[in-house]
Image (cartoon, rainbow, N blue to C red):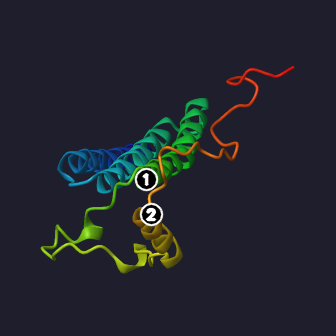
């Protein structure tokens, strides 16, 4: 009787894990942008693989196989969210924006958020305008500031 309950519980856990793997794989194909696809992949490997590994541990009983499956489960549970977070940060750093953030999916016209706009630096714009109004004379030699030249390599020494 107990063996039948353990076998049934392990099959239920494996079936639930398989369901989450199928849902996550479908999400990888159907989601619109990289961030929602990463969410689907996170569900796929964390919940799906986790439930299947727990089902296998229940089926194997208290053996060395269960210990190995527990170690694999711990590795997946610690590394998967960290990898997904690092991938999302890299995508944001590369300039990708979440699709739902721009409201294109919901049919709302896209506007850039005001928090990302910077006020123009008036001192800088005045200096640029003054430089454009009075361009430097090209016949005059440049008075070097030491930037971009390497003394001693390009110029012959006087000694």
Within the image, what quadrant is residue 72 found in? top right
Q: Which residue is mark 2?
A: 134
Image quadrant assignment for residue 98: bottom left
Measured along the vertical axis of the image, is residue 101 above or below residue 54? Answer: below
Q: Position of residue 99 (x, y in %)?
A: 26, 62
**Horizontal side of residue 95 vs 24, given as left or right:** right
Which is more toward the observer, 29 or 10? 29
Quick one: 119 or 2, which is closer to the camera? Answer: 119
Q: What x and y, as percent, mark residue 26?
A: 20, 47
Give residue 152's mark: none
Tag 1, which secondary structure? helix
Q: Give the residue at x 69% y 47%.
A: 145
Residue pointed to by mark 1: 88
**140 vs 19, nearest the viewer:** 140
User: Hey, which quadrant is residue 153 in on the image?
Assistant: top right
Q: Are marks 2 and 1 in contact (CB under 8 Å)?
A: no
Coordinates of residue 143 in the picture (x, y in percent): 64, 46
Can you see residue 140? yes
Front-lying residue, 41 or 107? 107
Q: Residues within 10 Å of mark 1 (few under 14, many from 20)?
A: some
Position of 24 with respect to 133 (left or right) is left
Q: Is residue 1 visible?
A: no
């Amino acid at each position: 009787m107990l063996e039948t309950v353990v076998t049934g519980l392990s099959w239920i856990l494996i079936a639930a894990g398989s369901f989450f793997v199928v849902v996550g794989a479908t999400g990888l194909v159907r989601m619109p942008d990289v961030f929602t696809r990463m969410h689907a992949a996170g569900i796929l490997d964390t919940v799906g693989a986790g439930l299947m590994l727990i089902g296998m541990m229940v089926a194997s009983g208290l053996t060395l196989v269960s210990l190995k499956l527990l170690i694999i489960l711990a590795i997946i549970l610690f590394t998967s969210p960290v990898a997904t977070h690092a991938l999302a940060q890299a995508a944001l750093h590369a300039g990708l924006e979440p699709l739902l953030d721009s409201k294109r999916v919901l049919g709302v016209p896209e506007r850039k958020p005001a928090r990302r706009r910077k006020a123009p630096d008036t001192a800088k714009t005045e200096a640029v305008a003054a430089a454009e109004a009075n361009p430097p004379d090209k016949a005059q030699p440049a008075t070097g500031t030491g930037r971009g030249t390497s003394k001693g390599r390009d110029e012959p020494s006087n000694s």
